[in-house]
Image (spheres, rainbow, N blue to C red):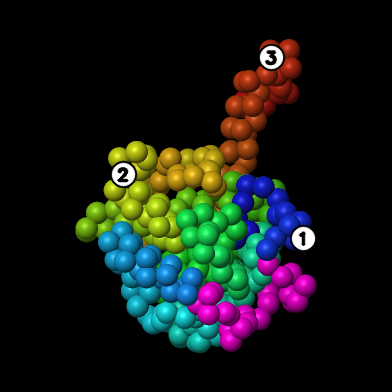
Amino acid sequence: MGMNEHPLPDTAGLRGDYGAMAADWTVRQPANGYSAEEHDVWRTLLRRQSLLAQRHACPEFLDGLAALQIDERIPDFERASDVLRRRTGWRIVGVPGLIPDDAFYGHLAARRFPVTVWIRRRDEFDYLAEPDLFHDFFGHVPLLFDPVFADYLQAYGRGGLKADALGAIEMLARLYWYTVEFGLIETPEGVRAYGAGILSSGGELPYCVESAAPHRIGFDLLRIMRTRYKIDTFQETYFVIRDFRELFDATAPDFTPYYAELARQEVLAADALLPADRRFTPPAGSPR
C-alpha cells in the first residue's frame, strides 16, 4: 500500500471508493455491510493462511495473530484497534485502497496502520494487484503487537516523510518491500517469514522458506536499497534478519548520506552504459 516504484495511478482506475474519504485518505469501515460471500472469502483465506503460518511464520506473528482473536467473519477495525492500542499504541484506520506515499507515511509516523476496507473476489485468491483487506489485516496487523517491530514501522513512516522531501522514495520503498512485505527472519526452528506479502500468499509462504530456488541473503541495508523488486511473481531474493532489533538498529541512522551515495552509484552505473562521448565528466577536483 503506497509502496511502489511507480507513481500512484489515477484513483479512477483503482477499485476502492475514493468519493467518501476524509482529507487524510481514510474512510469508515462498513463493519456491518459485508455480504455473506465476502465473509466466506475471508473465512476461506483465513483457514488456508493460518495453517500455512503455523509452519512457516515467525513466532512474533503467531503471537500477534493469537492476540487479535480473529474469528471467521471479517474483523471490525475498531474492536481490533482497541486491543492493539493497549499493547503498542497503534490503531487501524480504514482506507479505500492504495493511497499516496505522503499520506501513507504520515499515518505510520502517527502509529496508524492503513487497512483497505474491501476484500478480494474468490477468483483472486492467488494473485491480486492491489492490497485488499485480507492482505492488510492478516498480513500486517499481527506484527504490530511486537513492540520492536511496531517501533520500526513508526520510524519507517517518519523516514518516509523525510525521503519524500529528498526525492528518495524509490530507494526507501525497496526497504519496505524487502522487510515489511517480503522479509524473512532467523528463528531457532530455522528461517521463517514475517513479511505481509508472503504471509498473505498461499504459494509464496511455503516457497520462500522451503524452496532451493530463491537467494536468501543476510540483511544489508544499502544492498536492499539498490535492489529492484518484482510485483507480479515470487521474489528471486529474500533478505534475512537475525531479529527485529537488528532491523530497528540498522535503520536508525540518518539516511541522508545513504541516499546521496546510492544516487551517485546509480549515476555512475548509468554513465557507464553511455557512449564515451556522452558520459558525464565531473568538474576538476571533484570526487568521482
Q: Mark 2 or 1 closer to N-term?
A: 1
Residue furthest out toward the left: 188
Q: Amino acid at mark 2?
A: Ser
Residue 203, percent across and down?
Answer: 40, 53
Residue under numbered circle 3: 275
Mark 2: few, some, or many residues within 10 Å (few <14, many ≥20)?
few
Secondary element at image label 1: helix
Disc count in the image? 3
Instruction: Specify start and end residues of the magenta stretch as a single range.
Output: 16-39
Measured Cα–Cα span from mark 3 to mark 1: 42 Å
Residue under numbered circle 2: 211
Secondary element at image label 2: loop
Name the residue at 68% across, 63% down: 15
Q: Amino acid at mark 3?
A: Pro
Mark 3: few, some, or many residues within 10 Å (few <14, many ≥20)?
few
Measured Cα–Cα span from mark 3 to mark 2: 41 Å
Magenta stretch: includes residue 214:
no
Name the residue at 29% across, 48% down: 210
Residue 285 vertical placement versus 5 (above, below): above
Q: Mark 3 or 1 closer to N-term?
A: 1
Name the residue at 36% across, 49% down: 208
Label for residue 12?
A: 1
Q: Tell me, yes or no, if residue 13 can be seen here.
A: yes
Magenta stretch: includes residue 20:
yes
Residue 26 vertical placement versus 122 (above, below): below
From the image, state whether disc 3 or disc 1 is nearer to you.
Answer: 1
Position of 215 with respect to 16 (left or right) is left
Mark 1: few, some, or many residues within 10 Å (few <14, many ≥20)?
few
